[in-house]
Amino acid sequence: LGRVQVGPDCLDFYAIELERLLDPRPVPPPDSGAGGARSLRSFSFPLPPGCGPYLCTQGVGGHLTHFFPESFHAIDLRCSCRTPVLSIGDGVVKEVLESRRCGGIHAANLASWNSMSVRLDCGLIVEYLHTLPGSARVSAGDRVHRGQVLCETGDIGFAPEPHLHIELHDSNDPDGPSLPLC
């Protein structure tokens, strides 16, 4: 699958460079809307480089929680609590949910997370999950720009450790299957 890369001794960091895995099912492009055609190159990384490195702890079709159609293409990135979450593109904040305070691997936490969603100008909705309560720096209806701090990461909901769960959806089907991030 790839090679193991060992980081500096003091970081105790290991990463595996994997081949790109593609879902064989075709994904129709979202309606381009007023923002123009979907341009994947216009997305930025959702976490600041200075707080990394970040390890992808669950990817496409992950066996812990990414086997549902709604989260199949989601990515989980390990990070410390209170790591700033950055907008991957320009858009409008659709929803901010931050009243939950419990986390851990328990069935009661399966649908009990904090999250923020942004409707991107390209016609996609990006969802950021497991955020800390009270950390939102924006509100529903606010215009946001690529790289802007939205909130902070946490371990709220079904989370074995602090991480950011990020997924994309077509704005015409926000509760439908997730879409590939790349």
Image (spheres, rainbow, N blue to C red):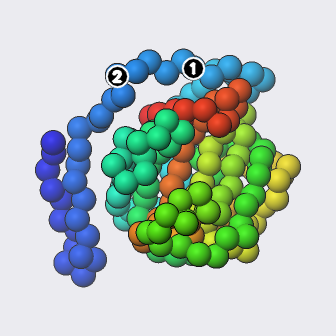
Q: Earlier in the sequence, mark 1 or mark 2?
A: 2
Tell me the SS state at disc 2. Answer: loop
Give the residue type at disc 2.
Pro
Q: Position of residue 91 (x, y in %)?
A: 74, 42
Tell me the SS state at disc 1. Answer: loop
Q: Residue at x 71, y 67 (%)?
A: 98
Nearer to me, 106 or 166: 106
Q: Residue at x 44, y 55 (%)?
A: 76
Q: Can residue 50 be seen by looking at this rendering?
A: no
Give the residue type at disc 1.
Pro
Question: Marks 1 and 2: which is nearer the front?
Answer: 2
Q: Position of residue 49 (x, y in %)?
A: 46, 62
| 41 with respect to 142 (left or right) | left
Nearer to me, 130 or 82: 130
Nearer to me, 51 or 78: 78
| 168 with respect to 17 (left or right) | right
Q: Residues within 10 Å of mark 1 (few under 14, many from 20)?
A: few
Q: As drawn, which residue projects farthest toward the bottom?
A: 10
Q: As drawn, which residue projects farthest toward the front?
A: 107
- Mark identifier at residue 29: 1
Give the quadrant of residue 30: top right
Nearer to me, 150 or 69: 69
Instruction: Give the quadrant of the C terminus.
Output: top left
